[in-house]
Image: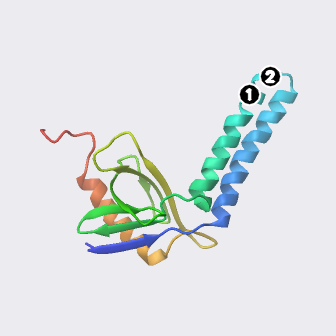
Amino acid sequence: MYNRIELTQFPSRALVGATLLFWSSAALCLVLLSLQGAPWPALALLPAGVMAWRGATAAGLGKGPRQLRVSNGQLYLVHADGHDEAVHPSPNSRISGHLALLKLRPAGTIVREYNLVLIDVPGCRNTDPDAFRRLRVWLRFALDTRSDTVSPDA
C-alpha cells in the first residue's frame, strides 16, 4: 500500500466542454418542448442553467479543492487557501480504470460532502496518471474496508 500520495487536480477544458454540452442540450430540449405549447419546460431552464454552472465549476473552473493527499492511511482534501481537511470516501463513490467520481465526506460530519471528478483519458485529463493510479488503488482498498452503513457498536 502507498504511504504518501499527492494528487493535484487541474482544470480540463474538454471536461468543462462536455459538461456544458450536456446541459445545453438539455436546455435546448426544454426550449423545444416549451415551443410546442407546454409552459412547464420553460420553468426548468433556470435550474438547468444552475446545474450547468455547478457542473462546469466542478469540472475545473471553480475555486474548490484542488489536491488530494493520503498520509498515514488518512485521506486529506487540500483546499485552495492551503488548509487541509480529513475526509472519508463515501460508498457512493465510483471508481473505474480512467474515471473516478468521488464523494468525500469530512470526518465528524454527515452534512457536507465534496464531489470530485478525476479523469485520466488522453485529451480529457485533469490529473497526473501515476498519482491517479496510486490513489485509485488506495481508494479501492479504503472503500472495501470502510462502510458508513455499519455502526461502530456492531
Mark 2 and mark 1 in contact (Cβ < 8 Å)?
yes
Please tell me which residue lies in front, 141 or 4: 4
Q: Give the amino acid type for the residue marked by disc 1 in the picture.
A: Leu
x, y percent for residue 70: 32, 68
Q: Position of residue 23 (x, y in %)?
A: 70, 46
Which residue is at 71% across, 31% downward? Answer: 44
Q: From mark 1 to mark 2, how far is it between C-alphas? A: 7 Å
Amino acid type at mark 2 = Pro
Residue 68, quarter of picture:
bottom left
Q: Residues within 10 Å of mark 1 (few under 14, many from 20)?
A: few
Above or below, comparing residue 131 to residue 104 in the picture: below
Q: How is the image coloured?
A: rainbow
Q: Quadrant of the N terminus?
A: bottom left
What residue does disc 1 label?
43
Image coords of residue 96 (percent x, y): 45, 60
As helix, strand or loop, the secondary structure at mark 2 comes to loop
Q: Is residue 47 above or below residue 79?
A: above
Q: Which residue does the image show at 66% across and 53% down from the upper left?
A: 19
Image vertical order of residue 46 relative to residue 106, above or below = above
- Residue pointed to by mark 2: 39
